[in-house]
Image (cartoon, rainbow, N blue to C red):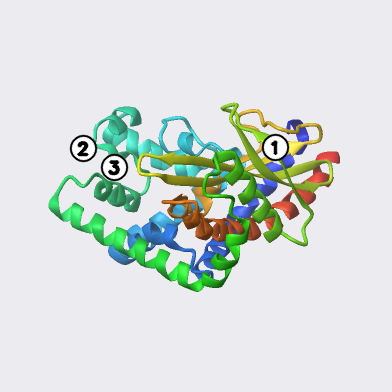
Amino acid sequence: MRGELESAIRDRLADLADAVPSWRLRLRELHLDAGLVDDDWIDNHCAPEVASQHRQYLREFWRETLMFGRPSVIVYSDEPCQSTYLNELKRRRFERYGPVQPLLADPRTRHLAELSVGGQYLSRIDERATNEDIELFRARARIVDDRLDVGRRHHARAVDEASAWLPERSAGELEIADSLARFIAHCLNPVEATVSAYRLVSKRETRAVRVRCADCAQLFAVVVVGPRGGGAWSVSLGWRLLSEGQHDSMPEGGGVLHIEELLPFSRYYHANSIRELRFPFVAFGELARILAEPLTAAIFEALPKAKA
């Protein structure tokens, strides 16, 4: 997707930053909020002004990510952003601590690379450099586990029904990607969604759910990795915007939405067996439901602007 249409769609996607809190609220209502533990931890354990600053940072970060799709550049580089607020945070970081790359290279200073005080606090805990931080890390992990358990119980019936979509126990990555893509397409009904082959930028073949939108399509790309080590599988979901004529690949950087930066979902990526993939299947089906309608609307609203 290039030129005026991509620019118009990016502008409309940026406007969706105001909708991200409602998407997150929907995850809470569905008991799929294990990925929101970090933000909740900041709200519950930091001073009110720190929590407020983190929320403002998130709003600016979401808008920047939706418009430009470069989350690592936004935070972990000294390059300027579109957002004057984020640029001010970068300026302060540089004045206090110097360039960001040396900060990231040293575990003792890695947390200082974060742009919000709350983010620095969480990052410091993640390093587990002290006994206190180790205990805080474990306490946070217990909350994540509790929320995952609540989610499994809440979706027990759907998890049971997802068994019909699982491949055989001996299935490989591509078969599981195909099964998950078909399950997501089923969840998007009555939206017209089809499953197709898809090749990632890394040249790896996978499967995707394609939703037609006038002269282009939005595509939910499924990524499956595993088993590794102890037999654990990993699944994730990406989003791409394709112009007419693009069938199985997307140029790097073009029309990419980083879902994880808006709706943290990595807690649902992993399973120890193919059977345990049932809950991630259900979680990703709900995630696609939340995103498909507003993203489709954004694309259609952008089309008249691009043709004007």
Q: Are marks 2 and 3 in contact (CB under 8 Å)?
A: no
Q: Quadrant of residue 253?
A: top right
Can see residue 46?
A: no
Q: Which residue is mark 2?
A: 108
Tell me the CA gap for discs 2 and 1: 44 Å
| Residue at disc 2, secondary structure | loop
Q: How many tags in the picture?
A: 3
Going by the numbered disc 3, the residue's amino acid type is: His
Residue at horizontal 52%, vertical 44%?
Answer: 170
Question: What is the crowding at mark 1: few (fewer than 14 residues within 10 Å), some, or many (at least 20)?
Answer: some
Residue, far right:
308
Position of 111 with respect to 178 (left or right) is left
Q: Residue furthest left?
A: 131
**Residue 92, image x and y in percent?**
34, 39
Judging by the rendered image, the residue that carries numbered circle 3 is 111
Q: Which residue is mark 1?
A: 197
Please, what secondary structure does the residue beneath circle 3 have? helix
Query: Picture coordinates of residue 230 (x, y %)?
Result: 35, 44
- Image x and y of residue 130, in percent: 14, 48
Depth order, front residue of 84/217: 217
**Real-space Cα distance between discs 1 and 3?**
40 Å
